[in-house]
Amino acid sequence: MPLDVAIQMDPISSVDISVDSTFALALEARRRGHSLWHYLPRDLSLKHGKPVARAQPMDVRRVAGDHFTLGSMEVLDLADLDVVLMRQDPPFDMSYITATHILEHVHPATLVVNDPGHVRNAPEKLFVTHFPDLMPPTLITVDRAEIAAFRAEHKDIIVKPLFGNGGAGVFHLPPGDENLNSLLEMFTERNREPVIVQRYLPEVRLGDKRIVLVDGVAVGAINRVPAEGEARSNLHVGGTALPSKLTRREEDICAALGPVLRERGLIFVGIDVIGDYLTEINVTSPTGIQQIESFDGTNAAGLIWDAIETRHAASRPA
């Protein structure tokens, strides 16, 4: 059955159609006959207790330089739709959090993917702390004495903003590096949030693996290898994507996470694994599905829509 779908995202004009996961989801939706609407996060409002959005009907196609068409702007009552995809990129700030509160007013009658309440309660670097046996030694704090003690114990550390994204603000401090205090001053001047400090994992030189899970089941992976002289493996800072299969340890990690993700309505999730350690659980706007398909042919976008359609059908009256 065709669905009416709105995608809350960054401007469709700015996406790279060769790698963007939201574009792949939109393309698969149109292939299935679903109608699409496009709106920006700033166009979402709560009016008299009802979520509404100034949106435009959208069509998409895989044509570089001509990949979309938008129609006339209309005000949509999101309660009239079947599905809303929450796909804007972080940062996970108060604007993002407010959007989750607004979308909760229609979910699950209008299926919001991922579940907005659980997105709000699962920021990438905090959700993972509920699985301490799977992650590397980690400290979240603003207490400099605690950070100094952690560094004295683990010697080689990574310091990064708790709500950062895309590798921004990630620093590797090997033993003897004298920049820790300056970095902490910089972080505290910018905001009042804690930082996250982790033991450095030298296995990152072999890659930071992104594993995509759909409704709690792993469907594919890529290995992101950092550039020479770079501690970060994110693709947009020079990391290289390579095909990859799951190790036994990674299968165990996915098996531990799967039931929790399904229960929370986190349909499309990307986890990051370095060596034997889970480092992040990405639920806000995961990426990687086009790279997976390019390597092994897995249509992850199709699997995501299978899961969405199944959940939507299950929520309808018999």
Image (cartoon, grey):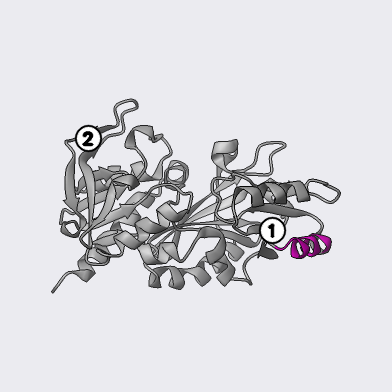
For residue 197, the mark is 1
- Percent coordinates x, y for residue 137 in the rendering: 70, 65
Span highlighted in magenta in the image: 143-152
Left or right: residue 142 versus residue 51 is right
Q: Nearer the viewer, residue 175 or 256?
A: 175
Considering the whole magenta stretch, tell me its main secondary structure: helix
Image point 35% across, 50% down: which residue? 301
SS at mark 2 in the image: strand
Left or right: residue 190 versus residue 149 is left
- Percent coordinates x, y for residue 72 in the rendering: 16, 36
Q: Quadrant of residue 141?
A: bottom right
Image point 43% across, 63% down: which residue? 120
> Label 2 belongs to which residue?
70
Is 148 covered by the magenta stretch?
A: yes
Query: What residue occupies the far left of the structure in this picture?
Result: 318
Quadrant containing the C terminus is bottom left
Q: Are marks 1 and 2 in contact (CB under 8 Å)?
A: no
